Amino acid sequence: MTASTGTGREPGRARVDRWRTKAEVLGEVRRAPGLTRVELARRLGLSSASVTETVTRLRDAGWITESRAPVQGRGRPTTCLGPCPDGPRVIAVDVRHEDWRVGLAGLCGDVTGVVGARHDREPEQVAGALREAVARVAGGHRVVAVGLAAPAPVSIEGRVSAGESAWDAVDLASVAAALGPVPLRVGNDATLAGVAEARTGAAAGAGTAVALTVEVGLGGALLLDGHPHLGARGAAGEYGHLPFGDPARRCACGATGCWGPEVDGRALARHLGDDPPADPRSYGDAVLARAAAGEERAVKAVAAVAASLARGIAGVVHVHDPDVVVLGGLARGLRAAPGFDDAYTAALMAFRRDRPVPVLDAVHGDDGALLGAAALALDHATSPEGLAEICGD
């Protein structure tokens, strides 16, 4: 998804090619644990001899294991392939505007052993805390990559933009350096939350999906067969900076009229006449709770912001024509507001209204970016390039 900000030598092309079939096999095991060798050969168009050689090498490298499958009727016993319980691990890091979390994941992608804490956005303090957490979570495991979700735009080279906060000042490369020469992959948090939804969440199986998350502003991703479209420079998915907002209002990004400030906690505060909140997400959740309890002012504020979100989503649908739109963060609560569906439908082109693109809540909730960070690290570690680097010749 992004280039590495860690270290490690670039393997030669021929060396990488020798791991291409192994990477394809690992990809199938990740998607469908429990496959038999026969099923694997059929899916990948491989001979039984090639499957045997590949499985043996991956098993010896500690990536996969085989367990005896139940035999139905007559026939020779067979085995099922799955992730090795003690195999290589990746570390997932989710840096958010007010806190951070770090966890460990194996080939299955589930994140366990999560630790976290709040932070004060001081760059050296954040980087130091992450280094300590990464080293602690790694423990005695064989860690082969680190994936990090950042709350800011990320370039194709893995550089974090200042965005709306000074996250570019955080020494992210040092986070993985605590483990030695382990590759670090960095992605935007909303993009990675979308990856998690496309792989195992509300958009699983969709050929084209849009994931949108409202935290501080709005971000998201266009997912094509489970993979995000990153654009020429890696910064695609900045939906919050579409000019759907008030053209007289300047966004912290430097542009005017951005959509993001119209649909987050700051927008709710403006409608209520409150000062800009220090933590827009927590403030927004509190306003949603007040609206659910029937407070009239909160109900009106939520309805106005929900309508702005709904109309913008209709515009995104017109551009991308997705199978589904998935909403995370504060957007889940806004979607439930009275009037959201009417505002969405009214903003759609007439031919779409009979069968509008469904707008669904994210399944993974606030864990989306962390799971996406794990997927980002695993995508690299199980690629031909990553396997050649990790496993050698």
Image (cartoon, rainbow, N blue to C red):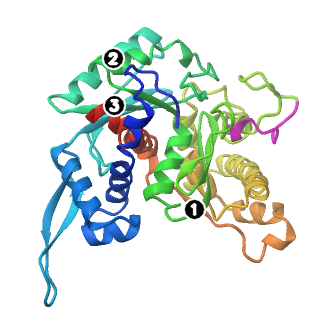
The residue tagged with tag 2: helix, strand or loop? helix
Q: Main secondary structure of the magenta part?
A: loop
Q: Which region of the structure is painted magenta?
A: 238-247
Please state, as top left, top right, bottom left or bottom right, where the C terminus lies in the image. top left
Q: CA distance from mark 1 to mark 2?
A: 39 Å
The residue that label 3 is drawn on is 389
Q: Looking at the rendering, which quadrant does residue 336 occupy?
A: bottom right
Q: Horizontal and vertical percent for residue 57?
A: 21, 48
The residue that label 2 is drawn on is 177
* Residue 66 or residue 358, whichever sits in front: 66
Residue 360: mark: 1
Task: Check disc 2 and give the amino acid type.
Answer: Ala
* Residue 167 or residue 26, whichever sits in front: 26
Task: Check disc 1 and give the amino acid type.
Answer: Leu
* 128 w.r.t. 21: above or below: above
* Residue 249 or residue 363, whichever sits in front: 363
Q: Are marks 1 and 2 in contact (CB under 8 Å)?
A: no
* 29 w.r.t. 125: above or below: below
